[in-house]
Image (spheres, helix red, strand yellow):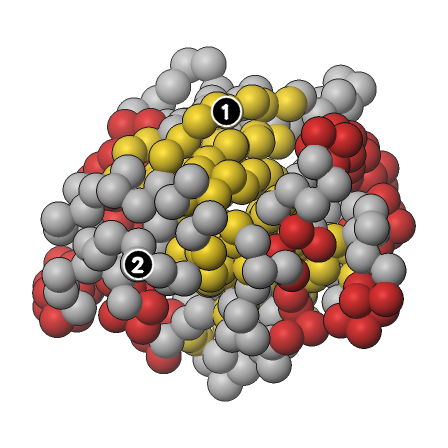
Amino acid sequence: MRKLSRLICITLLLSLTAVSPFNQALADNDKLTMMWWNVENLFDTVDDPLTRDSEFTPEGKKRWTEKKLLLKCMRISHIVKVAALKTGGYPGILAFAEVENLNVFKKLLSFLPDNSYKTAYHASNDPRGIDIALAYDAEKIRLLRTLSYRVNLRERNTRDITLYSFTADNCPFFLLVNHWPSRSLDQAWSEPFRLQAAQTAKTIIDSLRKISTDADIVVMGDFNDDPGDKSIQEILHATTERDAFSRKSIGKLFNFWTKSREKGSCYFRSRWFQFDQVMVSSGLFDDRGLSVPEDAFSCFHIRHMEKGSNRRPYATYKGPKYLGGYSDHFPLLFQAEVHKP
């Protein structure tokens, strides 16, 4: 307990050094930053009888307490602040996976001083009760509509895929957030679940393209598949080959992992994975609405978030053992330029 209190004090000091006047209105051709992060089990400490969350209680297997939740919120918010110093302001959109409920998400946001975030939280039917929580800067962008889609899996529930319709300086764009079924038990056994999730996402994207062939669509999430896997390449038709995308972009998505030198965003079973991804439609490669600069994408981390000689993500837990880290995933930053009409 004394060690945990010391960690909280150190994290608070780090966090305070990152505070700065973040909120800035969008200027001509300014950048809109989005942060995706699987924050690894951001649970409150209360047992919800409708979900399987009992391990994240003070009496549960994880011995999850208010002090541990406090440290987790401080760590995550610190990284948001550090990212803000890099990009010039809080991200316009935060999309965090593995958040238990709106209350604990708002608790996290309360650690970000002087923010202008509004929440758009959709509770899906995940057995453990974890969702994708989204916040957007109401001073920069406006939320027009939210639609959520169930991934139909036989005898198995998973997270919904949610579509957000936004506008930034009268430039409309769509954001599709995903957290596809995990590779639990075996990759081959679980792959059909992710293929079904991919097909659901593809149907949503196709419907948007029918409305406008050059719609600005951003697809992000934890896909539990790599960019070269069947669900991403063959169903979503997402490519990391910039030249191939330039030659034939209709019906395809561009996957930004080709633009990164990072090995991956998460590290399991002694290898790196690129499960967290950002993909965009061809509409972001013109000079209207949102567009992508050369430095649009990064897998963001600082030394405090790294662990071991391989600099893997400093996780909160390793199995039942409490480590006190940030998350078992690194966050992604995506910046788009906004061209006023």
Residue neighbourhood size for the residue with mark 1, other residues' Cα within 10 Å, grouped as few (<14), some (14–19), many (≥20): some
Residue neighbourhood size for the residue with mark 2, other residues' Cα within 10 Å, grouped as few (<14), some (14–19), many (≥20): few
Q: Residue at x 60, y 27 (%)?
A: 160
Horizontal and vertical percent for residue 192?
85, 37
Q: Residue at x 43, y 52 (%)?
A: 340
Question: In the figure, 17 relative to 168: above or below?
Answer: below
- Is residue 53 visible from the viewing direction of this image? no
Q: Which mark is residue 27?
A: 2
Horizontal and vertical percent for residue 99?
41, 37
Quadrant of residue 240 within the rendered picture: bottom right
**Side of 266 relative to 257 (left or right):** left
Q: Residue at x 40, y 44 (%)?
A: 168
The one nearer the camera, 280 or 321, is 280
The amino acid on which the numbered mark 1 sits, given as a three-letter code, is Thr
Horizontal and vertical percent for residue 130?
48, 32
Q: Residue furthest top?
A: 50
The one nearer the camera, 244 or 134, is 244
Q: Disc 1 or disc 2, which is closer to the eye?
A: 2
Q: Residue at x 30, y 59 (%)?
A: 27
Q: Which mark is residue 336?
A: none
**Side of 249 relative to 100 (left or right):** right
The residue that mark 1 highlights is 146
Mark toward the start of the polypeptide (1 vs 2): 2
- Is residue 255 visible from the viewing direction of this image? yes
